[in-house]
Image: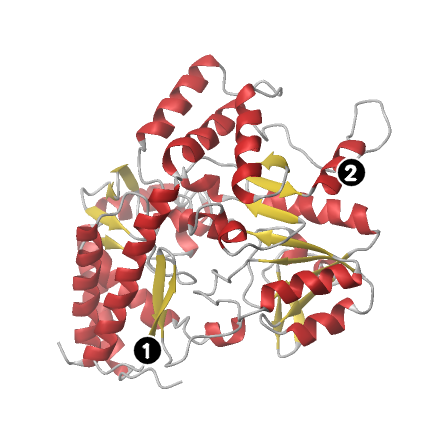
Amino acid sequence: MNVGFDRAVLAGFRGREERAFAARTRRSAALGLRAAAHLPGSVPMAWMAGLYPTVPLYAAEGAGSRFRDVDGNDYLDFNVGDLSMCAGFGPPAVVRAVSRQVAAGAHFLLPTEDAIWVAEELARRVGVPFWQMTLSATGANTEVLRLARLATGRERLVVFGGHYHGHLDEALVRLVDGALEPDGEGLPRSARAQTRVLPFNDLAALEAELAGGEVALVLTEPALTNCNVVLPEEGFLAGVRALTRRHGALLGLDEAHTFQFAHGGLTRAWELETDFVVLGKGLGTGISFGFYGMTAPLGELHARYLARDGGPRGLAVGGTTYASAVAVAAARAALEELLRPEDYVRIGALGQNLADGLEAHFARHALPWRAFRLGPRSGYCLEPALPVNGAEAARSLDAELIDLRRIYMANRGIWDAVQSAGPQVSLVHEAADIARYLTVAGEFLGELTGRG
């Protein structure tokens, strides 16, 4: 891959930026040393260390599109909690709803009327009629797979290379030199026994797999978003729908990310037909919850296999804190007051400006690159052509370059995206925020290429 710059330049100013970061985050470093006695990696959840190239940064507070660390440094946030904070920090509608519901009772292990409103709205907005709630998209995908197995009498799962569908064992697999491997340690060898990983945008490969009659579920994002962005080619998603129907498999669209990219998600925006839709990331509120929607026949099957204490064995779904009153209240606030059509139009336009600005920088610095673009998301494609599958997208996941860019931008008050994503416009970003990101990105590229 010709990335258009001298890689030795990275080492030339990586040390400078790391020293600057360490100097401005001494309080975080001290807390990390204290935490190491009881928190593996000095964090309460592994990703809080593993996703970032620096020592763990300890956050103190946030408001709108900015947060502050314990050293008093302010950051303009373009990571947005990997899409879990698209509503920004402290959105008033969510604060009001959650505060009111916590005071009235956070959870009853019983439904509240808000749950009906949310299900009715999701059915109207997305287009599938029946809904269930979990704690995350991982939980939702787990239950979707179990219901698909019940409905089809089959066990096999198909996903596409470059995927991420949460931490269920069956989806944590990857292709390495043509062989399936667990995508992490601690996973059972059996995790890959019933999973197949195929190339995105390859209908012939999918048809060959489905023809064997063993696939219960094809699970995919409408566009891949955990390897930067891979858009579907014309006719691909319609072809997937036709093939699953022809061969008796079910189709699940994982919109844990992409529901924040268009009103009603890409399922509605692109008029996609599907059996399941999965939502997650707390709809961008920062509250832990996810949803899955399903067609009427699947909803009826779900109800028919309801597990009852002392009764016959039912479908293996549910959890004690799923669909809590406070989570449902947060979901209603997000759908009713934040995720409106006009909000998506606004952030989509800002995302377009961000992508256009990045491509202008690439041209100015003679970099043969493209900007990823999908609604409010952009990013850095290190090649002249955008990818059509996960393997091609992986060539732009240059860890050395991405980590240096993120440290560089953090030192200048911008918190950039995790490696597998790109800068994301949130509901609370303004045009001035986009301009600030582009200014610092241009300075970085100038130093990288020596054309500052």
Residue 296 picture quarter: top right
Q: Amino acid at mark 2?
A: Leu
Q: Position of residue 286 (x, y in %)?
A: 41, 38
Which residue is tagged 1?
369
Q: Residue at x 54, y 44 (%)?
A: 126
Nearer to us of marks 2 and 1 is 2
Q: Position of residue 387 (x, y in %)?
A: 46, 75
The answer to whether 374 appears left or right of 74 in the picture is right
- The C terminus, quarter of image: bottom left
Near-viewer residue (105 or 221): 221
The answer to whether 219 appears left or right of 24 in the picture is right
- Element type where label 2 sits in the image: helix
- Element type where label 1 sits in the image: loop
Residue 108 picture quarter: top right
- The numbered mark, 2 or 1, whose residue comes first in the sequence reads 2
Near-viewer residue (34 or 93): 93
Q: Residue at x 32, y 72 (%)?
A: 401
Q: Position of residue 68 (x, y in %)?
A: 23, 42
Vertical position of residue 300 compared to residue 217: above or below: above
Q: Amino acid at mark 1?
A: Trp
Residue furthest left in the image: 452
Which residue is tagged 2?
301
Q: Residue at x 42, y 31 (%)?
A: 336
